[in-house]
Image: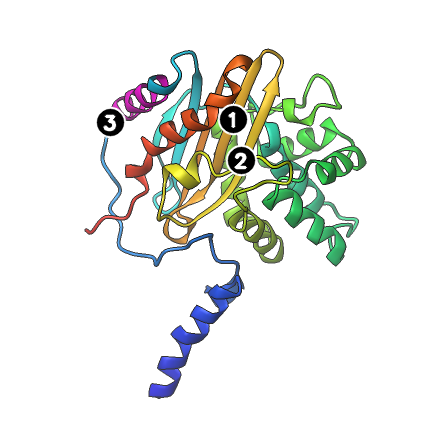
C-alpha cells in the first residue's frame, strides 16, 4: 500500500533522530552526523603518493613528528592506504576499546546490567578516565590487553610495562583496523550497538575537558563517523590518536596515530587533523 511505503522512511528517520536506524532488519545506533548511503567509487591512488601527501601535511604543521596510519575499506576488504601500520604507538585512551571489548566478551554476565552498560557508554563517548581506571583494575590491568590481543589475533599490541599506566599500552594501526572490523562485523548485535552508539555520540568536549574533535571529525567533515580518540604523554613523547569507522554505513576504518616530543603537545591536534584531512579523498563519496 502507498501508506506503508510512506511510513517506512518516516519511521526510519524518526529512529535516526532518537539514535537508531534500520540495518538488516535490526536496529542499530546511527553514526554521528550520518549521511545517506550513496554509490561510491574506490579512489585508485598509489599508496606511496598517499603516504607522501600525509607526511607533507603533518610536517607542514610540525616537522618533528612521527605518523602511522591505515585506511581500510570493509566493503571491498582492501587496504586503501597504509604507512608504518605495523609500528607501535602508545594507545592513550584508545585502549578503552580493549577494556570495553574484554568486559563485553566475558562469560560472567558482568556487562549485562544497565549500570555497567551506561558506564561503558560514558567511558567510550566521553573518554572517562575514572571509569577506565576502575574497569582496568577490576579486569586485571595488562591481562585485559593480552586477552583481547589473543582473541582477535593482534600481533603488535602489548600491555604497558607499568601495569598502572593503561595509556602506555602499545598498539599499531593495523591492529586497530582489526579491532574495528571485529566491532562492526563480529561483535554480537546488542554489544555492537552499545559500542557504536557510544562512539557515534562522542561529544566535542571529553570528560577531562579536552577537545576531542581533532583528526577524523575536523579532517573528514560532512561524513558519518564512530570514533575513539586518544591523547596524552608517554615518556618523553606526546601522542594523539584519531581512530574510527567512517563514511556511509561506516564502510571505512581510519586510523591515524601521531607522536612527537612532549614539548609539542599543544600542536598535535592540528598535526593529526592535517594528516587525516590528507586521507579524506579516500572515503569521500563520489558519483560512479
- First to last magenta residue range: 47-59
Q: Which mark is residue 46?
A: 3
Image quadrant in which you'd find residue 53: top left
The residues bearing labels 1 and 2 have C-alpha atoms spaced at a distance of 8 Å
**Which of the marked residues, 1 or 2, is nearer the chain's N terminus?**
2
109 vs 249, nearest the viewer: 249
Estimate the x, y position of residue 95 in percent, counting from the top left.
62, 32
93 vs 264, nearest the viewer: 264
Estimate the x, y position of residue 253 in percent, counting from the top left.
43, 40
Q: Which residue is mark 1?
A: 240
**Which of the marked residues, 3 or 2, is nearer the chain's N terminus?**
3
**Which of the marked residues, 3 or 1, is nearer the chain's N terminus?**
3
Q: Which residue is mark 2?
A: 229
Q: Going 77% across and 52% down the picture, which residue do you hit?
A: 109
**Secondary structure beneath label 2:** strand
Image quadrant in which you'd find residue 280: top left
Amino acid at each position: 500500500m502507498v501508506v506503508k511505503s510512506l511510513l517506512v522512511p518516516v519511521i526510519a528517520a524518526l529512529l535516526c533522530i532518537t539514535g537508531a536506524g534500520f540495518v538488516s532488519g535490526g536496529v542499530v545506533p546511527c553514526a554521528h552526523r550520518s549521511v545517506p548511503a550513496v554509490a561510491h567509487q574506490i579512489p585508485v591512488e598509489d599508496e606511496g603518493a598517499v603516504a607522501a601527501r600525509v607526511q607533507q601535511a603533518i610536517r607542514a604543521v610540525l616537522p618533528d613528528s612521527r605518523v602511522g596510519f591505515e585506511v581500510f575499506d570493509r566493503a571491498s576488504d582492501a587496504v586503501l592506504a597504509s604507512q608504518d601500520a605495523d609500528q607501535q604507538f602508545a594507545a592513550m585512551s584508545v585502549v578503552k576499546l580493549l577494556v570495553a571489548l574484554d568486559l563485553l566478551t566475558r562469560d560472567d554476565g558482568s556487562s549485562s546490567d544497565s549500570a555497567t552498560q551506561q558506564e561503558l557508554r560514558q567511558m567510550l563517548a566521553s573518554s572517562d578516565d575514572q571509569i577506565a581506571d576502575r574497569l582496568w583494575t577490576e579486569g586485571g590491568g595488562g591481562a585485559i590487553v593480552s586477552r583481547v590481543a589473543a582473541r582477535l589475533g593482534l600481533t603488535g599490541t602489548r600491555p604497558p610495562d607499568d601495569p598502572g599506566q593503561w595509556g602506555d599500552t602499545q598498539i599499531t594501526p593495523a591492529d586497530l583496523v582489526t579491532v574495528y572490523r571485529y566491532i562492526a562485523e563480529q561483535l554480537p548485535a546488542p554489544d555492537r550497538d552499545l559500542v557504536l552508539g557510544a562512539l557515534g555520540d562522542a561529544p566535542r568536549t571529553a570528560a577531562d575537558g579536552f577537545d576531542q574533535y581533532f583528526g577524523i571529525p575536523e579532517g573528514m567533515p560532512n561524513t558519518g563517523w564512530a570514533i575513539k580518540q586518544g591523547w596524552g604523554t608517554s615518556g618523553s613523547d606526546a601522542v594523539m590518536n584519531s581512530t574510527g569507522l567512517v563514511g556511509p554505513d561506516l564502510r571505512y576504518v581510519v586510523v591515524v596515530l601521531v607522536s612527537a616530543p612532549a614539548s609539542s603537545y599543544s600542536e598535535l591536534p592540528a598535526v593529526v587533523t592535517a594528516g587525516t584531512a590528507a586521507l579524506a579523498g579516500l572515503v569521500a563519496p563520489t558519483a560512479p
